Amino acid sequence: MIAGYFKRCGIRWCLAGFIVLFLALVAGGAGAETASPPAGMTQQQYDELVKAVGQSVIQTLADKGLVAKPAVSPAAAGDTADDTVLAERVAIILGEIPKVLGSYPDIGTDMAQLGGRLDRSGAGGRGTSGFLGLLVLVVAAALLAEGGVRRLAHARQGALAQGFAASGGLWRLASLALLDLLAVLALVVIVHAALGTLFNRAGAQTQLAGLVLNGLVTWRLLMLVFRLFLRPTLAAARIAPVGDASAHRLMRLFSAAILVMILAMAWVALLSLPGAVAAAMLTNSLFVLLVFVIVVLRGRNDISLWLTGLIDESGRAKGFKAGLARRWHWIALPIFVVLAIARAYDALSDAFSMPVGAILTLYVIFGLLLAETLSSFIVGRHEAAIRAGIRAESGRFMPFLVRAVRATLWVGAAWLLVRTWAVDVLLLVDAETWGEFSRAWTTAVVTALVAYFAWEAVHFATERRSGRVARPGAVGPESDAGQPLSATRLETLAPILRILLGVVIFATAGLTILASLGVSITPFIAGASVFGLAISFGSQTLVHDIVSGLFYLADDAFRVGEYIDCGKAKGTVEGFTLRSIRLRHQSGQIHTIPFGQLGQITNFSRDWSTLKFNLRFVRDTDIDKLRKVTKKIGQVMAEDPTFKDDFLDPLKLQGVADIADNATVMRFKMTVRPVRPSYIQREAIKRLIAAFKEAGIEFASATVAVQAIGGPGMEAAAAAAAASAATAKAG
């Protein structure tokens, strides 16, 4: 029987059975006396180990059908267990409400005891009145020091603000911020000096002084941040897009809200009784919520103006974003209510981590608002400087850098909030589970962020910076008298490079993200291969157009802005895709031609252009004089700053092109760059006409002289014939 049992279960299951039997004998033989744990292990750890081993063995034997499966309680099974735990937690919280409400008298008791704790006169220290008076003096001295430094720097700040408004320069804003920081540093120095000398003894006095003075420093530092953006007295250096009245009002509201939050936290920190702390936190959650609601309602129009200015500087923004900006308070109020409920839950559950999460959330929200404001301000100033010609096109690197920093800040803020609330506050997952989860998602998020940076870099490197576009109705490869149109070869290839690099970046990033999340990418690669093969067989014309376009671009046959003739159509190259090219005709029409149908290309805008034109002069014109006048005009035009960069060979008289019945046809020639040849030819002819007229050189007339052959009889006959014709016409 024993051999059969070994054969059926195997040695490991028998060992498991012996372990269970041993534990049962130990538990039964020990009676009320508990076995002592091994060295290095506590009794609780030993009991948990025994319980875990027993449950594991019983479950294993039950799975093999050797013993009956133990009954599973509903609270331990799946979603039912979660629901039960949640219900139990809600019941506990509801049961704590009467207890916390009944603890309000403890607040009075605790505050009454605070006076006794502050009185150190019996121990050779300061009394309560002396301590509070000294603390008030230190606070007043710190605020006076800050105000004095700010007043001393006011004139210099005004000069910096005016200089920034006149000629820009972010260094001026940095100098303004440094002067404001010096004022706050004066306050910080006094506070730390007081804490190190006047309030350096242990006890309630030092605790209260630390709370008050550190809260003062926090208040002034936060107000420094808002001052840098709002600048109530320096509108010329204001970063936030609001008016003077809004800036003053928002500074007052933010100052009051921050001060209330700091006082509320300090009040709770002074209490020592647990019931008093819970009751104070519950009161704080309601009072702070009331203060924030008042701030939102009083400042909703000012902050709406702020948010709308981030979308459109004119303040006339439309669309979904503008609607959210104007109704931001309907989003902020529920957030503040949720944060107040979280603080109330914290007070009722004795888990003092909610205030940290709530305060951190507020810091992150305001930090993102200020970061968006600063980025919008920097990008707007740079674009305005570029439009005004103050900053070169290379300054466009700053918007790219700002976008990269913005994306990083948003991703970091989202990760921080999720981690804080999921792990530290709500305890939805433990640190180990979060570590496993975050490793996979961190790789995915970082990959997506790097892909975004790479795409922004590609877009920055391939965007066209010259801003030259063809004017509708332009004739030939020029738009007007002085604006060249042709782009560089890199600018011509930029759209194709942008598309190809974009596909590579996003495909690589997508596969990397899927692999980091545990998704097999082999089917995607195989599917892409099959799909590419099907496209190559089913779209031969498309492939022909794409390949032809690549060869045209590799041969540098044309560039954006050049005037070409492909047989089927002619016009200025406005752009192209992987498959086709767009030509703008001089009459305004746009021709879209697939690359496979282009054929022979004639480019009128490449390297140089030789212009030849003929003028008719009277037959007895002095050719040497004509040549001298033409040479003089050619030298003047070649030295003219407007045209000297265009000429490769000056205007000159090439010689006699033809001799007509009543005129000598002269040919003129010049070689120019293919930027605006038609305009230069018109200007040359205009100057030649004026110079020839001044030099007395006459152009040939189109009138043909007719000489009658014969005597008076012929003239009389002609007169009679004319009179007869006139009579017949009258009849």
Image (spheres, rainbow, N blue to C red):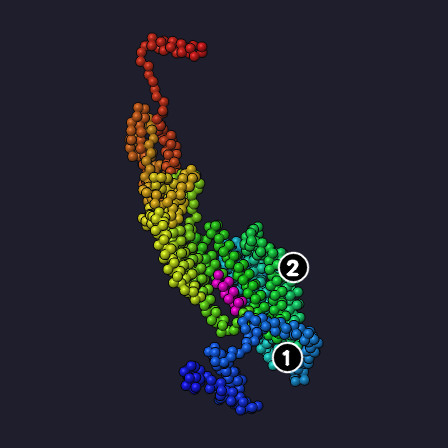
Q: Secondary structure at mark 2?
A: helix
Indicate yes or no whether the magenta region holds residue 332: no
Which callout, 1 or 2, points at the residue further toward the start of the chain?
A: 1
Quarter of the rendering occupied by the N terminus: bottom left
The x, y position of residue 153, in whole percent, is 57, 63
Tell me what residue is drawn at x 53 percent, y 64 percent.
178
- Label 1 SS: helix
In the rendered image, which residue does mark 1 sit on? 204
The residue shown at (44%, 66%) is 517
Residue at screen point 47% across, 52% down: 386
Residue 68 visible from this viewpoint: yes
Q: In the shown orientation, is residue 209 left or right of residue 490?
A: right
229 relative to 626, above or below: below
Q: How many marks?
A: 2
Structural crowding at the residue carrying mark 1, measured as other residues with C-alpha within 10 Å and reported as few (<14), some (14–19) or many (≥20): some
Residue beneath the point at 58% across and 77% down: 196
The numbered disc on residue 654 is none
The three-letter code of the residue at mark 1 reads Ala
Q: Are marks 1 and 2 in contact (CB under 8 Å)?
A: no
Q: Nearer the viewer, residue 39 or 101?
A: 39
**48 vs 704, nearest the viewer:** 48
Q: Which residues are magenta?
A: 407-420
Foreground residue among 416 and 217: 416
Report the predominant secondary structure element of the magenta stretch: helix
- Give left or right: position of 47 versus 553: right
The image position of residue 26, as x and y in percent, is: 51, 89
Residue 658 lies left or right of residue 252; in this view the side is: left
Q: Which residue is mark 2?
A: 298
